[in-house]
Image: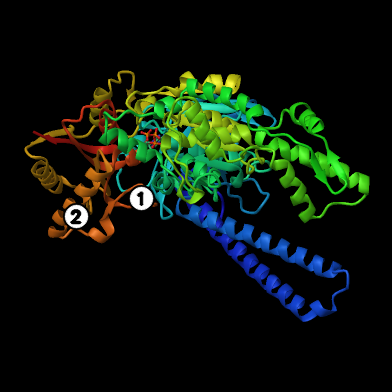
């Protein structure tokens, strides 16, 4: 088969053929590899009794076996990628005339690199390859890209876009301009996806600049609702992994996401882009794990939100305890602990003695930089070293433990819970209940102050190899939490969020304090263009939040439906849910996902119960298409989802119904309505009920 790379359809046929051949080769080599592995196992079991006494042969065998297993795994991984590529081998093409040349060179761009054989010139270039930047960043005309050897200049003669599904060309056309708006329109207008989609076909220029930025250590992106922040963060990870394979492995990346539902919602994108095993966790979960030796349970953020919604008049210490003043007080207290916590005395062990004055000297001078609660350990180690040198032999574990205990007993207490409680009392707050570890539970307002105290008092074991941290929904973290993040992860970061989607009464702009925490290494980017919603929905939502500076992608739909259900609470809710059942457009040829979004957990639970009864009567497929999402849910399903606004954050649905009590016009409930409204891709119904 000859190559005709000027015609997309012919090239598709050519590439498909080559992909199939390559997959067949790889399958063959996997099979042979497996046979080798089995052979090695057999050889080992038959001969291991006779292997040389030093185990060299045994060791060599194991190395060979491991090597073969790894090689096979890599082949399997490659085959998986090529099989995926068979479905849609490429989506773009750039014809580029290098400076000084006459004829253009043709670059096809796809989800991964593909060459006829390993080491050959690629037939298809990975979207992350340097040359692929041309596709996203330039229209027809002069252009350049950054290659490992420097800037390569030239001219784009033409640019093409393709849609290929199941190996068939659905359309191809030449586009002069940036990623063509029509294709973007088609991508955004289509329903039918339960989870976040990958956007490689239509990454926009300003998004591409963020994805490909490798210069800045800390990137902070303030992006309007639906501007693509989460999508960009994930594509950026894929990009960084591709370009720095030697130093950056997927296990070096951690995504701090709001909850498990969100993790599930985004979980398939990176594997789709060829990257697996990225760790995701919520900051709350991380904090609880860090505090499990101090308390047995902690409240989570949702307890805090629920409290402020259900008892708006109840005074909350949350803000106060996360404030700068509170931290300053804590710092003052920590300084006073340097003396108050200590009860120095001579230490004797067998015939060796360490005098109190010497201990004090080591403690306050030699080891003064070690955090207070870890410092005595260093003093003890110093003593152990001396003893070992003098008697010329090492202490065993038991001896070490005895000595260590003598030194550690000089702390009046090492219990963080007790120390924090005393600190609270010293500032005039109620202390924590005096109970055993099993009964200790922290209120949310105390979780991060205790964690901060822990990091200030105890030496950190180096942190889990994380080299890049992604923080999504940055507006939901307090200044205190960022201070902790900085202590825990002295690495590169991508921090993204939207100040308009705060879940507190007052919107907080983290950009106000982040530069003070991270210093000059920070780079700030603002994205005001929104892609998710129709113009009607986005304009409606902006009005709710008083936003005027957003740039909307020009996609239109139906007007937002606003309805008010008057009457007693129960009847009004019933009437609203009847309306929902009538208006729901789920099903074949209709929408794939819909949501009913409510204010509180109890309202959501009750609405889910009523709705379930109503839908069951209509023959709705409850088992597969209905779910109530609560804070412990771990997965996001297609069909109709009932949940609260704070759990719906970050997600999106084709059709959204928002149902709030009209009487609650508190700032946080207003935020809730805004968040609910911005979740809708195509259709939005804003319902209110009350007297
Ligand atoms: N370049 C693009 N091409 C196609 N779709 C895009 C593009 N950018 C964003 N989108 C789509 O816009 C929607 C919103 O994206 P995403 O969820 O990443 O935004 P976000 O800024 O994190 O939103 P929010 O803060 O409101 O949760 C998604 O459906 C995403 O696929």
Instruction: Give the quarter of the figure containing the N terminus.
Output: bottom right
Q: Is residue 157 visible?
A: no
The image quadrant that residue 28 belongs to is bottom right
| Residue at mark 2 | 612
How many marks are shown on the rendered structure? 2
Between the residue at mark 1 and the residue at mark 2, the CA separation in whole angstroms equals: 18 Å
Residue closest to the eye, 393 or 542: 393
| Residue at mark 1 | 636
Structural crowding at the residue carrying mark 2, measured as other residues with C-alpha within 10 Å and reported as few (<14), some (14–19) or many (≥20): some
Nearer the N terminus, badge 1 or badge 2?
2
> At x 35% / y 29%, what residue is drawn?
316
119 lies left or right of 614: right
Q: Secondary structure at mark 2?
A: helix
- Residue 39 is situated, as x and y percent measured from the top left of the image, at 72, 75
Instruction: Give the quarter of the figure containing the C terminus.
Output: top left
Q: Is residue 89 above or below residue 474?
A: below
Q: Is residue 568 above or below residue 58?
A: above
- Residue 325 is situated, as x and y percent measured from the top left of the image, at 49, 20
- Residue 685 is situated, as x and y percent measured from the top left of the image, at 18, 37
């Amino acid at each position: 088969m000859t190559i005709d790379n000027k015609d997309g359809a012919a090239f598709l046929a050519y590439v498909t053929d080559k992909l199939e051949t390559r997959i067949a080769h790889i399958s063959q080599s996997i099979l042979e590899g497996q046979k080798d592995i089995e052979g090695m196992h057999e050889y080992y079991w038959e001969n291991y009794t006779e292997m040389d006494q030093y185990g060299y042969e045994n060791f060599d065998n194991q190395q060979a076996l491991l090597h073969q297993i790894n090689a096979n795994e890599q082949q399997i991984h490659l085959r998986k990628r090529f099989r995926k590529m068979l479905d849609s081998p490429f989506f773009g093409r750039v014809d580029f005339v290098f400076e000084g040349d006459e004829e253009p060179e043709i670059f096809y761009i796809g989800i991964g690199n593909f060459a006829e054989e390993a080491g050959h010139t690629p037939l298809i270039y990975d979207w992350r390859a340097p040359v692929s930047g041309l596709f996203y960043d330039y229209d027809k005309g002069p252009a350049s890209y950054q290659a490992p050897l420097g800037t390569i200049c030239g001219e784009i003669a033409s640019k093409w876009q393709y849609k290929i599904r199941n190996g068939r060309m659905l359309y191809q056309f030449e586009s002069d301009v940036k990623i063509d708006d029509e294709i973007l329109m088609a991508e955004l207008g289509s329903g039918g996806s339960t989870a976040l989609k990958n956007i490689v076909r239509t990454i926009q220029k300003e998004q591409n600049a963020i994805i490909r930025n490798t210069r800045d250590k800390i990137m902070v992106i303030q992006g309007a609702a639906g501007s693509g922040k989460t999508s960009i963060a994930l594509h950026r990870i894929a990009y960084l992994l591709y370009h720095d394979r030697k130093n950056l492995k997927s296990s070096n990346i951690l995504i701090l996401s709001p909850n498990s539902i969100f993790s599930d919602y985004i979980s398939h994108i990176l594997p789709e882009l060829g990257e697996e095993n990225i760790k995701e966790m919520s900051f709350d979960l991380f904090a609880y794990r860090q505090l499990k030796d101090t308390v047995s349970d902690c409240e989570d953020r949702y307890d805090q939100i629920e409290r402020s919604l259900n008892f708006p008049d109840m005074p909350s210490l949350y803000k106060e305890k996360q404030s700068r003043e509170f931290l300053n007080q804590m710092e003052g207290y920590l300084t006073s602990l340097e003396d108050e916590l200590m009860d120095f005395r001579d230490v004797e062990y067998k015939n060796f003695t360490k005098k109190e004055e010497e201990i004090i000297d080591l403690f306050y001078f030699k080891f003064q930089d070690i955090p207070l609660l870890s410092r005595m350990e260093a003093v003890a180690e110093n003593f152990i070293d001396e003893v070992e040198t003098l008697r010329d032999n090492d202490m065993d574990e038991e001896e070490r433990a005895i000595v260590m205990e003598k030194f550690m007993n000089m702390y009046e207490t090492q219990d963080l819970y007790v120390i924090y409680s005393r600190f609270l009392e010293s500032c005039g707050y109620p202390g924590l209940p005096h109970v055993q570890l099993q009964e200790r539970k922290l209120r949310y307002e105390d979780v991060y102050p205790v964690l901060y105290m822990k990091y200030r008092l105890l030496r950190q074991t180096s942190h889990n190899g994380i080299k890049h941290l992604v923080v999504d929904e940055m507006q939901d973290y307090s200044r205190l939490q960022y201070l902790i993040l900085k202590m825990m992860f002295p690495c590169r970061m991508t921090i993204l969020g939207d100040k308009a989607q705060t879940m507190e009464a007052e919107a907080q702009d983290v950009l106000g304090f982040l530069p003070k925490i991270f210093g000059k290494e920070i780079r700030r980017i603002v994205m005001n263009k929104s892609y998710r919603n129709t113009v009607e929905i986005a304009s409606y939502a902006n009005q709710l939040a008083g936003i005027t500076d957003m740039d909307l992608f020009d996609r239109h739909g139906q007007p937002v439906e606003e309805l008010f259900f008057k009457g007693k609470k129960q009847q009004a809710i019933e009437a609203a849910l009847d309306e929902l059942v009538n208006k729901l457009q789920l099903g074949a040829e209709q929408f794939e996902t819909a949501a009913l979004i409510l204010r509180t957990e109890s309202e959501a639970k009750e609405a889910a119960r009523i709705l379930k009864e109503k839908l069951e009567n209509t023959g709705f497929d409850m088992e597969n298409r209905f779910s109530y999402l609560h804070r412990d849910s771990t997965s996001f399903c297609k069909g109709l989802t009932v949940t609260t606004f704070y759990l719906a954050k970050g997600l999106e649905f084709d059709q959204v119904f928002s149902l709030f009590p009209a009487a609650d016009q508190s700032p946080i409930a207003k935020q809730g309505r805004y968040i609910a409204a911005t979740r809708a891709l195509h259709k939005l119904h804003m319902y209110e009920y009350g007297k």
